Image: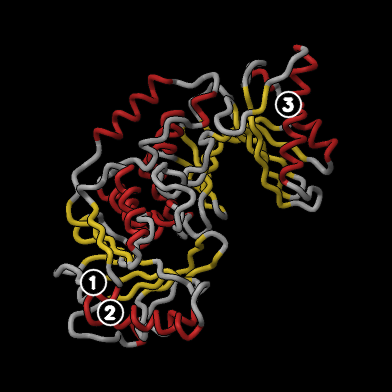
Amino acid sequence: MMNLIPLNSNSLYLTVLTQKGFEPLLANELMKLGATEIEERKSAVYCNGDLKLLYKANLCLRTAMRILVPIFEFNAFNEQSLYQGIQTFNWTKLLDVNGTLAVDATIHSDFFNHSKYVALKTKDAIVDQFRAEFGVRPNVAVHEPDLRIHVHIYHNEVTVSLDSSNESLHKRGYRAEANLAPLNEVTAAGLILHSGWNGKGTFMDGMCGSGTLLIEAALFAKNIPPQINRSYFGFMGWNHFNADLWEQIKAEAIAAIVPLEGQIIGNDAVFKVTEIAKSNVAKMNLQQDIFITNKRFEEQRPPEGGGILIMNPPYGERLEIEEINQFYRMIGDTLKNKFEGFDAWIISSNKEALKHMKLAASKRMVVWNGPLECKFHKFEMYRGTKRQPKETAVSNE
């Protein structure tokens, strides 16, 4: 067994999980928060920091999914060696006998086949240690445990971490799970950061759905911490939680919020959807900052002066092939005819439909919307130009 950190130290080694392709964005966010020894990995960024960074990162990071604190590593080839490895750690340092715990696991291994089984064996090893010493055991709590443990197995290498976030950080608290919103909050924030928008001027989403892009744009532009309304993080259940430091960090973050410079405009063709979007906007108290209308995309009249447009149109799952191609052709025609001066960013997994926009992208990149590999294309709508020369296209694929 190898211990990775002294648990009562202000020098922490962090593993910050993100979506594939967002690693550079997350690394930049962490650098701005004061992290050191930053290293990008696949779907994660490693860094060093202290408790202040840990708390602030959970509150303020826009492209993070979870923030883990690795505590020890060992090798395991079967369930017995996994069980024994987990028991080599003294869990009474972190959890009271009357406390609660939860265990999650991710595996990439030929030795272990089921993540839920790994999580169950880990839980058994921990509670058996308590039962052997005290005659009683901690309870399992799914939602707000005192200690959420994350087990990652790569081949035979087992890394055990504390999950400082508890729930995934893409859950900001403003969007009902039943909403028809293909983009999660981290994806939306990442697209906005990828676009290079500086938070000023006009930001538009012409097919806004439940308003996720609009809300994330407003949070970014006003420097509002994305987790400002979250009441519980995993680190709050730890036995060395510093409540005074947490309150100080939260107060400083609230004091750093700024007024919106510019305008944020959303639209959707479905009235019921726009009502959902308005409800979500109200949950974040952003009604004065986001203006939402109910129109077809081709009926919209964007404000003069240009700006940034980001859209997540349908990919074609519920439309026939010819119809989806016509739909994307309409998007291209509308951009050419009405969005002069805008940088228009379109995300879609339908590569064929994107071609029917009849526009040459000045930038292309691969992003992931859940399990779907998508293209994120930038179209610069120059004054007096209907189509850019092909030689201006740049590929970041």
Give the residue type that dot 1 points to.
Answer: Gln
- Depth-wise, is mark 1 or mark 2 nearer the camera? 1
Residue tagged 1 = 300
Residue contact between numbered discs 3 and 1, judged by CB atoms under 8 Å: no
Residue 201 visible in the snapshot: yes
Three-letter amino acid code of the residue under disc 3: Ile
Please name whichever residue, 200 or 69, is drawn nearer the observer in this view of the structure.
Answer: 200
Q: Position of residue 259 (x, y in %)?
A: 18, 44
Tell me the CA gap for discs 3 and 2: 60 Å
Asked if marks 1 and 2 touch (Cβ < 8 Å), the reply is yes
Above/below status of 360 relative to 169? below
In the foreground, 264 or 35:
264
Q: Looking at this rendering, what residue extends furthest in the top direction?
A: 134
Q: How many marks?
A: 3
Q: Is residue 133 left or right of residue 45?
A: right
> What residue does disc 3 label?
126
Q: Position of residue 15 (x, y in %)?
A: 55, 42
Q: Earlier in the sequence, mark 1 or mark 2?
A: 1
Coordinates of residue 126 in the picture (x, y in percent)? 73, 26
**Which residue is labeled 2 in the image?**
334
Residue 151 occupies which quadrant of the picture?
Answer: top right
Inspect the image, locate mark 2, and give the three-letter code of the amino acid beneath it: Thr
Left or right? Give the position of 123 relative to 269: right
Q: Nearer the viewer, residue 346 or 284?
A: 284
Q: Secondary structure at mark 1?
A: loop
